[in-house]
Image (cartoon, helix red, strand yellow):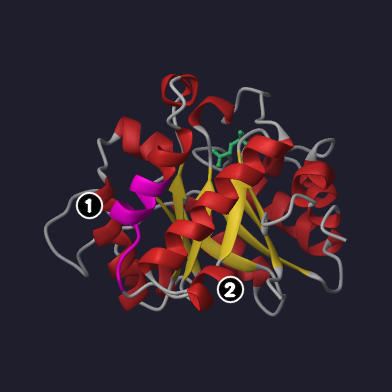
Amino acid sequence: MRKKLIAGNWKMNGDIAMAGTLSAAVVDGMPAEGVEVVLCPPFTALSTVAKILKGTKIALGGQDCHSAASGAHTGDIAANMLVNLGCRYVILGHSERRANHNESDADVRAKAAAAHAASLVAIICVGESEVQRDAGRAAVTVAKQIRGSVPDDSTAANTVIAYEPIWAIGTGRTPTQAQIAEIHDEMRRTIGERWSREVAESMRLLYGGSVNAENAAEILAIDGVDGALVGGASLKADSFLAIVKSCH
Ligand code: PGA
């Protein structure tokens, strides 16, 4: 049985005061059981949020890491540095990083391998553009990204894959339930072919892209959807907690 996971991706938002208030409110409203939650604040707020999450069931995550363990990489953060701050997860290969920082599948794969080596769970993002969807290439695009971005050493324990159609991120538009179900089936089939049926059946596959308090219950009820990666709606405790509670 795959336990649902709700990950809050704060992106480049929030100062220290906001991070403290928001994470404390999430701790206060967190249901006692039935769902796992991870908060991914910007690097600058990680230590503040780490203090508030300490001793709770809510996990901490980074939004990126470098593929090297250390070295001359100005501005970058190593996986072990995230672990050092109390992180258990790291988001990798988000479409904003693929677009803004030219990250290729091979780059994402190297970062995920580094995350695994540091004992982090990698939340690896995949998803088609609108042009690819309109051309009928959504499923093949996602399958190719999985084969290219997910390292060989991946297991259901160290890897989560998030299906995030680029056209649904921050737009208020979401795929139909049938479209999400179709891609999730395809993802599980690809994982089964590349690793094994056991890995495919136990790895958590999230949906992300305009998940909010109103549509969460419907999306989380889709067969094969094991949780959500939430951007905008994770910046308010009320909407984020409503999504977390939709898992019940
Ligand atoms: P959104 O972002 O919920 O604001 O659409 C999701 C994401 O990019 O992870």
Residues in magenta, as a range: 143-152
The kind of residue tagged 2 is Ser
Residue 126, image x and y in percent? Answer: 44, 45
Q: Is residue 27 magenta?
A: no
**Residue sitting nearer the eye, 73 or 110:** 110
Q: Residues within 10 Å of mark 2 (few under 14, many from 20)?
A: some
Tell me what residue is drawn at x 46 percent, y 70 percent. 85
For the C terminus, the quadrant is bottom right
Q: Residues within 10 Å of mark 1 (few under 14, many from 20)?
A: some
C-alpha gap between disc 1 and disc 2: 24 Å
Residue 228, image x and y in percent? Answer: 66, 50
Q: Residue furthest left?
A: 72
Q: Quadrant of ligand 1?
A: top right
Q: Is residue 1 left or right of residue 203?
A: right
Asked if 54 appears above or below 60 in the picture, the reply is below
Q: Is residue 167 left or right of residue 43?
A: right
Q: Which disc number belongs to residue 106?
A: 1
Q: Secondary structure at mark 2?
A: helix
Asked if 21 appears above or below 194 in the picture, the reply is above
Main SS of the magenta segment?
helix
The residue that label 2 is drawn on is 202
From where the camera sits, is residue 41 visible? Answer: no
Q: Which disc number belongs to residue 189?
A: none
Asked if 169 appears above or below 62 in the picture, the reply is above
> Is the CB atom of the residue marked by disc 2 within 8 angstroms of ligand 1's nearest atom?
no
Asked if 177 appears above or below 59 in the picture, the reply is above
Tell me what residue is drawn at x 40 percent, y 40 percent. 140
Tag 2 or tag 1, which sits nearer the N-term?
Answer: 1
